[in-house]
Image (cartoon, rainbow, N blue to C red):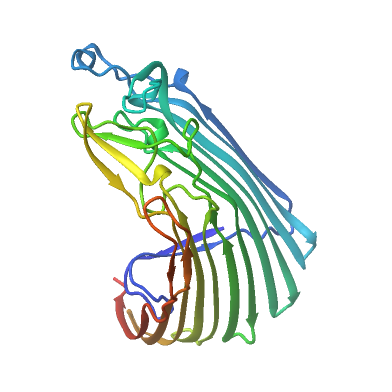
Amino acid sequence: QETSLETSGMTAEASTGGVQINYVPKDGGNDFKAYGVVSYANKSLQQSNLTDALRARGVTSAGEIKRNDAVAMGLGGPLKRDRLWFYTAHRRWGTDEIQPGAFFNKSTNPFAYVPDRDQPAYTHLTNRDHSVRVTWQVSPSNKITVSESLQSNINAYLGTNALISPESSQYLTYFPQSLTAVTWSHPASNRLLIEAGAGYMHNPKATPLQDGVTLDSVQVNDTGTGQRWGAFATTGSTAYSAKGQAGHQMNGRASASYITGSHAVKAGITFYQGWDHVDRYVTQSLSYTLRNGVPNSVTQYAMPLVYDNNMSSNGVYAQDQWTLGRFTLTGGVRADFFVGTVKPADLPAARFLPARHFDGVNNVPNWKDVSPRFGIAYDV
């Protein structure tokens, strides 16, 4: 329904600086309304910029749209006139993009990359979103909204290019990814507004093996050609995961505002709780480095890596705003408390390491911050 952005002069409501974005979703209303959009494109609807001059310089293929499509619809209206409304939206969109100079690997030798000129490599992205929001005007001074969004995301062959073979690229999937939110607003008088809300995001992530990759596959890098193939070896967040990873979180807020017109006072609290689960491994716990086809080095990985983190952040703030002629003065103070915890971890025995145990660690970090906020604006 509405999007607002703040780029500077942050009030005490925000815990951090930088751009702050506030989305106001659609509530529906007393009239039924429907929206829809469909779009589609493929390489037949795209021109190529591969010229003879580029071919003479060794460029054999150009980037192309293999598939680019989107289907979306929204519907809103009354469940009970003047009392209960709904809005629901559903969307599917994605794209397959052929990468210039990139091809699937047809080599049967794990120490060699042979491009399959009949199979151009591409990146694959597919997203789905199903959302519904219900608004209930409980009384003239009480309104409650409940919203739910369910999403899925598949990002295959991420990072594939002329130097990275598809089987050595990233594969990320998020499902079922959901966001549940509840808000309550209570205009106690024409000057006093009380609001509260809470939300929970369920955010699982799977990073499976690409097609053609097995547990016996090994990533190979050739520093002479710059080529990478065979598998994907990293200790970062996009590493292979045996049981999946997760980054769930819960947020909440409550505030009271007293507004007289030229004067506005607001005080409130915010809270955040996050849970981070990590499960990562590298196939064979190895990667090889060649130089122009000649073995150069071996990298061994201390994997698998399994651990859990908890994060908690709570804040309390108060602020005041005055309008004096063309000047608007803002003053406030905010106190934030952030605590991180690493839970105990038991890592299984690996190819190059025995089983290991790590005790939990509390207060990593434990921050307490008090931030004064002052601002002045002049209406020219």
Q: Residue at x 39, y 18 (%)?
A: 116
Viewer-side residue, 4 vs 354: 354
Q: Residue at x 51, y 68 (%)?
A: 275
Left or right of residue 142: residue 172: left
Q: Quadrant of the C terminus?
A: bottom left
Q: Quadrant of the N terminus?
A: bottom right
Left or right of residue 126: residue 138: right
Q: Quadrant of residue 110?
A: top left
Spot occupied by residue 86 in the image (x, y as percentages of width and height): 72, 58
Q: How many marks?
A: 0
Spot occupied by residue 20 in the image (x, y as percentages of width and height): 40, 66
Spot occupied by residue 112 in the image (x, y as percentages of width and height): 31, 24
Looking at the image, residue 271 lies above or below residue 332: above
Q: Residue at x 49, y 33 (%)?
A: 95
Spot occupied by residue 321 in the image (x, y as percentages of width and height): 40, 85
Viewer-side residue, 86 vs 334: 334
Residue 308 visible from this viewpoint: no
Q: Residue at x 44, y 62 (%)?
A: 355
- Residue at the right extreme, as displayed: 80
Viewer-side residue, 251 vs 300: 300
Residue 180 visible from this viewpoint: yes
